[in-house]
């Protein structure tokens, strides 16, 4: 019986994560598919460069909320099925990872999605808000120093693992949240592989630069 809520939350999490916020905003704001510009991503950074600050902020918020909502839904679903209390945290992990996968490979728009850092951030905020808050200065300090959003996103993703470990070992955070970090972070980094190549080649655009058609 426990398999039913897991399957349900994974499907819901994936479908929520797959909602193409960036594509929708790009179409509504400028009638374009943002994936044909810049990095080819539907994430907030590419929307910012392609459409503008307001559109980028809307997509950023939408993507964070997707991750948070997917995780939050695990609680009522698992309680509806009278699952054991300890299983809810594993439901959080499963739905969070599913949302990350959905954003990375969205079924609605041909499986070409975003980098998933904002979705992962929303998911961890719903699981452990204080862990999420630790990541905020990591990102902004990195952006201020490097001017690369992609590099800052990768460093922030790695910081998620580092920040989660002490809360699990010495705190009362469930081990499932560390599993989320260990699964989601490699996905986020893998989705940044094109950015990593451009960073090495020194062709990665810095923050403030406009996106060009691909």
Image (tube, rainbow, N blue to C red):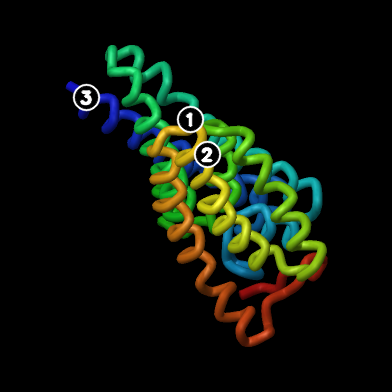
The residue beneath circle 2 is 167
Q: Is residue 36 visible?
A: yes
Residue 68 rendering spot, x and y as whole percentages: 55, 33
Foreground of the two, 186 or 21: 186
Q: Which one is closest to the eye, mark 3 or mark 2?
A: 2
Residue 108 makes an appearance in the image: no
**Marks 3,2: beta carbons within 8 A:** no
The residue shown at (59%, 63%) is 154
C-alpha span from label 3 to label 2: 27 Å
Real-space CA distance between mark 1 and mark 2, rounded to the nearest whole angstrom: 6 Å
**Label drawn at residue 2:** 3
Specify the farthest residue to the bottom. Answer: 201
Which residue was labeled with disc 1? 172
Q: Residues within 10 Å of mark 2 (few under 14, many from 20)?
A: some
Looking at the image, residue 71 lies above or below residue 105: above
Label 2, secondary structure: give it. helix
């Amino acid at each position: 019986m426990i398999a039913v809520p897991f399957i349900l939350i994974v499907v819901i999490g994936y479908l929520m994560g797959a909602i193409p916020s960036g594509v929708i905003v790009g179409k509504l704001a400028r009638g374009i598919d943002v994936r044909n510009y810049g990095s080819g991503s539907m994430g907030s950074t590419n929307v910012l460069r392609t459409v503008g600050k307001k559109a980028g902020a809307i997509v950023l918020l939408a993507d964070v909320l997707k991750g948070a909502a997917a995780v939050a839904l695990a609680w009522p679903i698992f309680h509806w099925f009278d699952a054991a209390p300890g299983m809810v945290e594993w439901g959080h992990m499963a739905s969070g990872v599913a949302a990350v996968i959905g954003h990375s490979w969205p079924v609605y728009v041909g499986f070409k999605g975003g980098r998933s850092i904002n979705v992962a951030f929303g998911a961890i905020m719903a699981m452990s808000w204080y862990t999420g808050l630790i990541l905020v200065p990591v990102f902004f300090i990195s952006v201020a120093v490097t001017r690369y959003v992609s590099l800052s996103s990768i460093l922030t993703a790695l910081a998620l693992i580092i920040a989660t470990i002490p809360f699990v070992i010495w705190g009362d955070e469930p081990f499932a949240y560390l599993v989320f970090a260990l699964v989601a972070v490699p996905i986020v980094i893998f989705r940044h592989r094109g950015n990593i190549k451009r960073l090495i080649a020194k062709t990665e655009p810095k923050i403030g630069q406009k996106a060009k058609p691909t």
